[in-house]
């Protein structure tokens, strides 16, 4: 029996090791490529970090490409989308959670149904609307598209959290003379901090990594985002994989640092919701 258990444990360890290598190797390969001399992916060694070490790829990225401009464009879109989503979803969720009005359930179900359909179904309509309003090839037009796509699900998510906050908090504030807006800003928002942080993070990561919508909306090189700019390094007409790898690492570093620094806080805050009344 003991031998059988050791055999099973060995098989499990071997299986998990193989899966780990399959997952880690592509990441390690990209990291190694960013510091490897050369340009083409065909010149990259199969074993990472065996063909020398250089920082020329990062120097080339910042000095000979528009990477800083792409970074700022993407940062502008991601921050505006994150803040806008938090503001719109919070107000909508507070309205649905605290007020009673006609067709309330109909509106909620409609938002959920809209979220079921993938975004690419409405791409032609999005293109036409942005063209009619003069927002094509405009970063703020892209922000509006992301904001519209994020609002339904995030409103549902925010409402579910606000429903756990006792209504007695609102009533106490109203007795003290606070308006609905002041109650929302000074009572509800601080208590909903965990879900707000979660919405800010998830709303930021989407625009930061997206390629399809920017490719459709943006046209001029001055408005390109990071995904569009990095993709231009590995097209059929250009094979600059090491520069692509260097840019990819820089994109990922802020997220890794942020999640490592706030991991404990996020887990604690998400598990410390208000007690349901």
Image (cartoon, grey):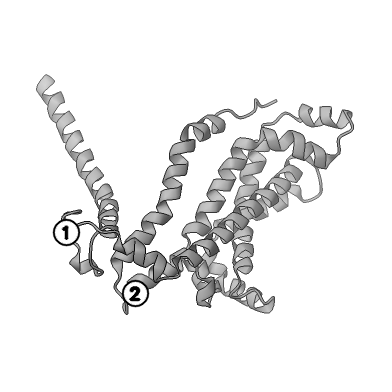
Q: Which residue is drawn at 77% across and 28% down?
A: 169
Q: Residues within 10 Å of mark 1 (few under 14, many from 20)?
A: some
Pick the residue in front: 234 or 159: 234
Residue labelled with disc 2: 235
- Image coordinates of residue 32 in percent, x first then y, are 25, 55
Residue labelled with disc 1: 51
Q: How crowded is mark 2: few (under 14 residues within 10 Å), some or many (20 or more)?
A: few
Residue mark closest to the camera, 2 vs 1: 1
Pick the residue in front: 135 or 254: 254
- Image coordinates of residue 257 in percent, x first then y, are 43, 43
Name the secondary structure under disc 1.
Answer: loop
- Image coordinates of residue 115 in percent, x first then y, are 58, 56
Quarter that holds the N terminus: top left
In this rendering, position of residue 204 left or right of residue 226: right
Q: Quick check: 9 above or below 181?
A: above
**Residue 134 seen in the figure:** yes
Q: Residue at x 54, y 64 (%)?
A: 73
Distance in Å between CA atoms under marks 2 and 1: 24 Å
Pick the residue in front: 150 or 222: 222
In this rendering, position of residue 71 left or right of residue 171: left
In this rendering, position of residue 52 left or right of residue 95: left
Looking at the image, tell me whether mark 2 or mark 1 is earlier in sequence order.
1
Q: Which residue is drawn at 54% across and 58% down?
A: 75
Pick the residue in front: 160 or 19: 19
Snapshot quadrant of residue 127? bottom right
- Image coordinates of residue 227 in percent, x first then y, are 44, 65
């Amino acid at each position: 029996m003991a031998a059988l258990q050791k055999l099973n444990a060995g098989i499990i360890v071997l299986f998990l090791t193989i899966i780990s290598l399959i997952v880690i190797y592509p990441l390690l390969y990209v990291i190694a490529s960013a510091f490897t001399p050369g340009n083409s992916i065909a010149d990259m060694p199969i074993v990472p970090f065996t063909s020398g070490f250089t920082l020329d790829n990062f120097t080339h990225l910042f000095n000979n490409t528009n990477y800083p401009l792409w970074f700022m464009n993407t940062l502008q879109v991601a921050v505006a989308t994150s803040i806008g989503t938090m503001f719109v979803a919070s107000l909508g969720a507070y309205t649905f959670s605290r007020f009673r009005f006609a067709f309330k359930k109909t509106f909620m179900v409609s938002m959920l149904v809209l979220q079921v359909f993938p975004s690419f179904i409405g791409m032609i309509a999005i293109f036409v609307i942005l063209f009619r309003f003069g927002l094509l090839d405009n970063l703020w037009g892209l922000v509006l598209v992301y904001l519209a796509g994020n609002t339904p699900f995030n409103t549902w998510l925010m409402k579910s959290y606000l429903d756990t906050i006792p209504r007695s908090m609102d009533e106490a504030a109203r007795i003290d003379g606070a308006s609905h807006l002041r109650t929302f800003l000074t009572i509800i928002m601080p208590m909903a901090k965990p879900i707000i942080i979660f919405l800010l993070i998830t709303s930021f990561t989407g625009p930061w990594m997206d390629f399809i919508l920017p490719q459709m909306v943006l046209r001029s090189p001055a408005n390109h985002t990071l995904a569009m700019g990095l993709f231009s390094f590995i097209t059929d007409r250009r094979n600059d994989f090491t520069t692509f790898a260097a840019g990819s690492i820089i994109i990922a570093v802020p997220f890794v640092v942020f999640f490592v620094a706030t991991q404990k806080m996020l887990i604690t805050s998400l598990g410390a919701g208000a007690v349901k009344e």
